[in-house]
Image: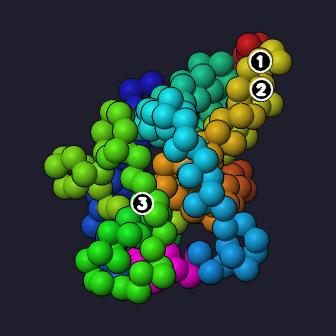
Amino acid sequence: WWREILIIAAVNVVYETVRNLSAGKPAKAYSNALLIIDWQRNLGIWHEQAMQKFALGFTPLIVAANYFYGSIYIAATLFTLIFLYSKFPDDYPLFRNTLMIGTLCGLIGFALFPLMPPRLLDDTLLLHGANANLWFGFVDTLVEYPTFWSFNDAAMKTISNQFAAMPSLHCGWAFWAFISLLPRMKAWWSKTLVILYPIVTTYVVVITANHYVLDAVAGFALFTFAYFVAKAFTRAGRGTPITTAN
């Protein structure tokens, strides 16, 4: 188990370091955001403004979304790894490798396509005096409502690349947990929770104005790709799997 902890910790250090070193310039991140918005409008899926406006009418929903955004992706990912390692050891290497490949490949997207999240769009307009017709009205809920942390915290400003939005790894990791856990759950309630997890995550990242819908789609696609890459070279694992799960 200590070897697995070291592997996962090493991948996390590489991910955090490279992600923050690859921060793009605000002007490029802003132009990419306008491109994403145009694509979504053409596809008929530009609903982020309406979704957040509706959610802002229910403060408990926004507060819950903030806490979900700031914590569940870590807890759910760790739970999935521990669950697979202890209950399904033969399956564990495949999904560990899927997680690592998807996470590290996400760095390519961050470097090649820096993307300004919705919550920062109007800050850019204020700074550069852009056309008022481009005012979007998104609220940075992590700043305006209670939560564990926000990107405006001094520590987060130092360690966080705020333009690392495409793909959404919150959504990618949720999809990874979904494909890892769903076939191994037996009870209806546990299957329901697993199915809801990527759906709720997508809703949360949108109403908190941290991502666009296409960021979530890219996260799902990335981890689908990572799964098939991992499957091509991963040998089944550590011992006899235990097939009972709640």
User: Looking at the rendering, in which quadrant would you find the N terminus?
Assistant: top left
Picture disc at residue 192: 2
Q: Amino acid at mark 2?
A: Thr
- Figure disc tally: 3
Q: Categorize mark 2 by other alpha carbons within 10 Å: few (<14), some (14-19), many (20+).
A: few
Residue 160 to residue 3: above or below: below
| Nearest to N terminus: mark 3 or mark 1 | 3
The secondary structure that most of the magenta stretch takes on is helix
Residue appearing at x 63%, y 57% in the figure: 50
Q: Nearer the viewer, residue 155 or 37?
A: 37
Q: Quadrant of residue 241?
A: top right
Disc 1 residue type? Answer: Trp
In the rendered image, the vertical position of residue 242 relative to residue 169, given as above or below: above
Q: What's drawn in magenta, residue-wise?
A: 29-36
- Contact check, label 1 and label 2, Cβ < 8 Å: yes
Q: Which residue shows up at 63% across the image and 65% down it? A: 214
Label number found at residue 119: 3
- Residue 150 disc label: none
Asked if labels 1 and 3 touch by Cβ distance under 8 angstroms, the answer is no
| Residue sitting nearer the eye, 66 or 172 | 66
SS class, disc 2: helix
Instruction: Label 1: state its secondary structure.
Output: helix
Q: CA distance from mark 1 to mark 2?
A: 5 Å
Label 3, label 1: how many angstroms apart (C-alpha)? 34 Å
Q: Which residue is mark 1?
A: 189
- As drawn, the residue found furthest toward the left would be 154
Q: Is residue 2 visible?
A: yes
